[in-house]
Image (spheres, rainbow, N blue to C red):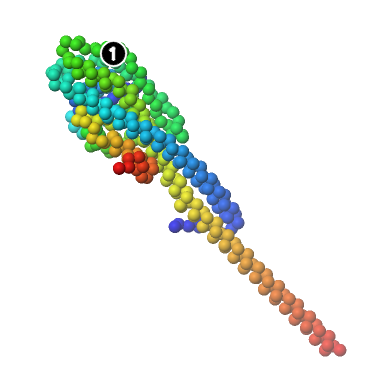
Amino acid sequence: MHKIAMIGDRDSVLGFMALGFAVYEAIDADAAATLLHTLARDPDNAVIFISEQYAAQIEADMARYKDTPLPAIVTIPGANGATGYGMRAIKSAVERAVGADILFKE
Amino acid sequence: MAEIRVNPTRMELKKLKTRYATARRGHKLLKDKRDELMKQFLAIVRADKELREKIEAGLSRAYGSFSVAAAVSSPAMLEEAMILPRRQGELTVGYRDMMSVRVPTFSVKMVGARGGYIYGFAFTSGELDGALHELGEMTEDLIRLAELEKTAQLLAEEIERTRRRVNALEYIMMPQLQEGIKRITMKLDENERGNLTRLMKVKDMMLAAGRDMAQAEEDEEKEAE
């Protein structure tokens, strides 16, 4: 049985506790990075959600797991609202594949 | 451009031609693969973008009601209410093959009461119920988002790799081989021409020698007369 983990600050993760996610509270980005590596090492954690305000600071740590099938690391907005980081991640994936941004023409 | 240095022999020419044919076939195949990967990738990314927009809107609503709930009840109370999961998400992981890229598929099954709340209503507010309800509705979407984003990442990597290969074949490998084939052909032709002129020269020399000998014999005969 695989687990769904969630890393974020207290306000962001509390709600997910009730959904049965394995919730990990991080007080800052460094703590989030350490948590991320610990969680990713355990093959049971298939999906790791991480709140955007930390994700933006530990991009390099998340990039390490980009090319392996598991775990899937997904950024979702935290309690302070969406920063647009998740959308930028999609954009950068498109740029990586296509060589140019063809989806978010602004 | 680095050139392929081989002996200009017909053997090497044959080898180079085989390599060129293989490179061309590989190039075509990889190009097709890249195009198909791109098609699937774009479909996934579009779905991903849409779902993300939906989730971001839903989450901000849920967080909104959540903070209201947090404001009206004490943190300890709130945590107590949340500590026992209302519904447990059971996550199953499978794999599927997408253009020979192994991508994970997630399916989540919610077990537990659908509408029920595990905490008593006495100490919690109605906003909390609303927030949890919204979050609960979003679980499946969240897992679907995880699947889409992971697939997009993996495909992006594969596309990048395939594109590099296609370019390497198209702009490095194939021109080099063509250049090598051209050089050997030219060298062989040059040798052939060299040979031909040499033969012609030898023939001329032999004819001249024959003529001289005939002349000498004629002179001898005349002298004898």
Residue B62, picture quadrant? top left
- Residue B69 placement (x, y as % from top left): 17, 20
- Residue B188 placement (x, y as % from top left): 59, 62
Outermost residue to the right: B225
**Count of picture labels:** 1
Q: Amino acid at mark 1?
A: Gly
Whether residue B73 is visible: yes
Q: Residue at x 29, y 36 (%)?
A: A87
Does A72 sit above or below residue B163?
above
Q: Nearer the viewer, residue A101 or B212?
A: A101
- Residue B198 placement (x, y as % from top left): 65, 70
Q: Residue at x 37, y 32 (%)?
A: B47
What secondary structure is found at the residue carrying circle 1?
A: loop
Q: Where the N terminus of chain B falls, by quadrant?
A: bottom left
Residue B135, picture quadrant? top left
Whether residue A96 is visible: no
Outermost residue to the front: A106
Q: Where the C terminus of chain B falls, by quadrant?
A: bottom right
Q: Nearer the viewer, residue B81 or B5?
A: B81
Q: Residue at x 42, y 27 (%)?
A: B95
Q: Residue at x 35, y 26 (%)?
A: B144
Task: Name the chain letter of the residue that bears numbered label 1.
Answer: B
Residue bearing the label numbered 1: B115
Q: Residues within 10 Å of mark 1 (few under 14, many from 20)?
A: few
Residue A82, picture quadrant? top left
